[in-house]
Amino acid sequence: FLKQDYKGMQHKLRNAVSSNSEDALTWSCFDVLENLPYLDKEAALDEILEDSFEGKSPLSFKSRGVESNDIKIHVGKSYTGASTNESTEVDASIEAPGILVFIEAKLYSSISPASPPEKPHDQIARKLRVGLDSPTSEPREFHFVFLDIAPTDAMYERREKAEALGA
């Protein structure tokens, strides 16, 4: 996954080997899932989704009859909305017949709706819009998984510091 073309996004490569990088953690997990030759992908993904949704996942690959060879897992793939022409890069994505899943991971970083003028919408809203508007030749469900990998106490401490600084 380090050999991918990031179209000038060198910060991705700099963070790729850092244990403090949500990109590195996400890439490591999903790159392994995509590249293990005999992995039962649908079972592994179902288990990840069950954990993500605290046992109430709205999606199951196995129950839909999706097989491992029909599942494509991507790290750092860019998507563009069909009608909005808006683009976004997703930490990890899963494509299967009738299914598109975007996975966004954060590590010790809060999400703020504030954004620079050239990007009029916040990062998460943009990913949701692009995922829902992603072009396809067949109808498919879109799911979005937001992973916050930081311990809760560390997130609160970071938020309190940011609020004290007026951020």
Image (tube, grey):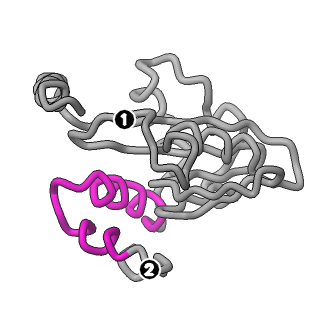
Quarter of the picture holding the C terminus: top left
> Who's the residue at 20% across and 69% down the image?
17
Q: Nearer the viewer, residue 72 or 66?
A: 72
The answer to if 95 sits in the magenta stretch is no
Whether residue 47 is visible here, answered yes or no, is: no
Residue 111 circle label: 1
Residue 33 in the figure: left or right of residue 63: left
Residue 38: give x, y in percent of width and height: 47, 62
Q: Nearer the viewer, residue 66 or 58?
A: 58
Badge 1 or badge 2: first in the primary sequence: 2
Quarter of the picture holding the N terminus: bottom left
Residue 49: give x, y in percent of width and height: 48, 33
Mark 2 lies on a secondary structure that is loop
Highlighted magenta segment, given as a residue range: 10-36
Q: Quadrant of residue 62?
A: top right
In space, the residues marked 1 and 2 are separated at their CA atoms by: 24 Å
38 is higher (above) or lower (below) than 96: below
Q: Which residue is mark 2?
A: 8
Mark 1 lies on a secondary structure that is loop
Residue 45: give x, y in percent of width and height: 49, 42
The secondary structure that most of the magenta stretch takes on is helix
Q: Amino acid at mark 2?
A: Gly
